[in-house]
Image (tube, rainbow, N blue to C red):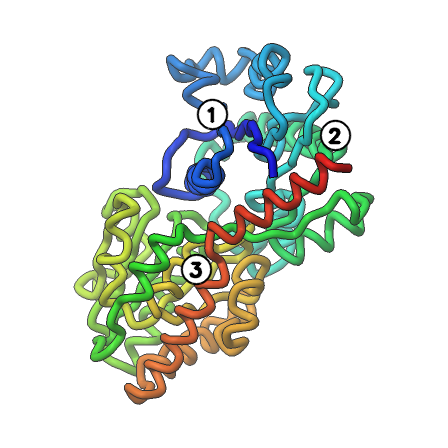
Amino acid sequence: MKKLKILLVSRHFWGNNMGIPKVFFDFKHEYELKGHQVDTLSYEDLYPKGQSIFDKVVGPVYHELILKYLKINASKYDIIEANYKCVPYPKTAFNFDGVLLFRSHGLPQVYKIYEDIPPYKNVLEDHHESIRFKTRIGNIYRGIQRKVGLKELNASIEHADIVHALNGAEYKFLSENGVPKERLVLLPNGLEDKYIEEATALNVENKGNNISFLASWTLRKGITELNEILNTIASEVEVEEFHLLGGYQSKEVVLRQFKKENYSKLKITPKFEQVELIPLLSNSKVGVFPSYVEGFGLAVLEQLACGIPVVAYRVPGPTDILEELDSSLLIQSGDIDSLTKKVVEILNMPEAEYKKLAFRCKERAKVYSMRKVAEQFLEVYKEALEA
């Protein structure tokens, strides 16, 4: 395969510590290991001095800045991988005859389906007043933004040569809504191979009753259910530690979701570097992930690699990862009793049985080697270029 020139386009900050930026960071690393040239266009390039209030309200939107860049530079590349909504233009608008990929990081239309049905709908309604800027004017502004954003999203899908789906629900939605299957590709995200190697080497024996929650601190991740989850588990078994990892919120903000009597069980680590994650997870015996909808569920995979079974809701993302490992780890959304019952079952497992489950978790994580996933994308590009 010839060496490709690839441009990764995102409107997020560049880095490897969380979410969408980490996905792009890891793909860049893998592509470059195979000798391909990879350039990036991200938030820092679009807004080198940051965004002022004026920029956010009346300045050029990010995809207009991207278009300006592409008009000058697109012809240098064979492949443009664009985060969703970043390139809502036909390739003729920027004189590009290579392959344009629409990359999903969680398809907003699928998220919206889950926002409009219980239990996620109920959570959003119950906490309507706690969401920032929920004023009448703010609601009108956000409503306009959503409509414009959906138009940009659909245009990005329409003009891409390849439309990426991150999970089975996205693939089904896109194929049922007019995207030809010859333009669709269903591929997951992956874990850095070095992470898999180090995580799978962890000893899983003689762990205490330690529970981990690894996620951003948002309503979508099920944070409003965590206190009840902890209470119910603690009523059945002694919980040594409930470790809340990530989220980038202060301890004071996190503690608002819990009753004071549970404070002594909590360990809160709002921020960490990626290299710190394995040591931070090393004492966890089971993970909980009550997210109402995901694009993928990288946090689930990061824990599985450490040999930590994760109990999650049966929603897009976690379902794709956990179904083939052990379907009993998947619980109907909002069913806290069943979720906590499964957690207690794992905490009470005989050592030999737990070790077998932990080994299967590690083996499942190996399927998502970033190196293998990157190779699959490169094969897709090769076929598209030849076509």
- In the rendered image, the residue lying farthest to the front is 1
Query: Residues under labels 3 and 2: Cα distance?
Result: 32 Å
Frontmost residue, 84 versus 34: 34
Crowding near the residue tagged with mark 1, few <14, some 14–19, many ≥20 C-alpha atoms within 10 Å: some
Q: Please tell me in which quadrant of the rendered image residue 317 appears.
A: bottom right
- Circle 3 sits on which residue? 301
Q: Position of residue 127 (x, y in %)?
A: 47, 48
SS for callout 3:
helix
- State whether residue 301 is above or below residue 146: below
Q: Is residue 223 left or right of residue 243?
A: right
| Residue at mark 1 to residue at mark 3: CA–CA distance | 26 Å
Give percent across and percent down for residue 122.
Answer: 55, 56
Chain-order first, disc 3 or disc 2? 2
Residue 99 left/right relative to 176: left
Mark count: 3
The alpha-carbon separation of the residues under discs 2 and 1 comes to 21 Å
- Amino acid type of the residue tagged 1 in the rendering: Ser
| Residue at 33% over, 59% down | 197
Q: Nearer the viewer, residue 304 or 221?
A: 304
Image height of 34 relative to 327, above or below: above
Residue 70 lies in quadrant: top right
Q: Which residue is mark 1?
A: 42
Above or below, 299 relative to 236: above
What residue do we see at 56% from left, 72% from top? 324
Helix, strand, or loop for circle 2?
helix
Instruction: Name the disc covering residue 159, or none.
Output: 2
Q: Position of residue 209 (x, y in %)?
A: 25, 75
Q: Amino acid at mark 3?
A: Leu
Badge 2 amino acid: His
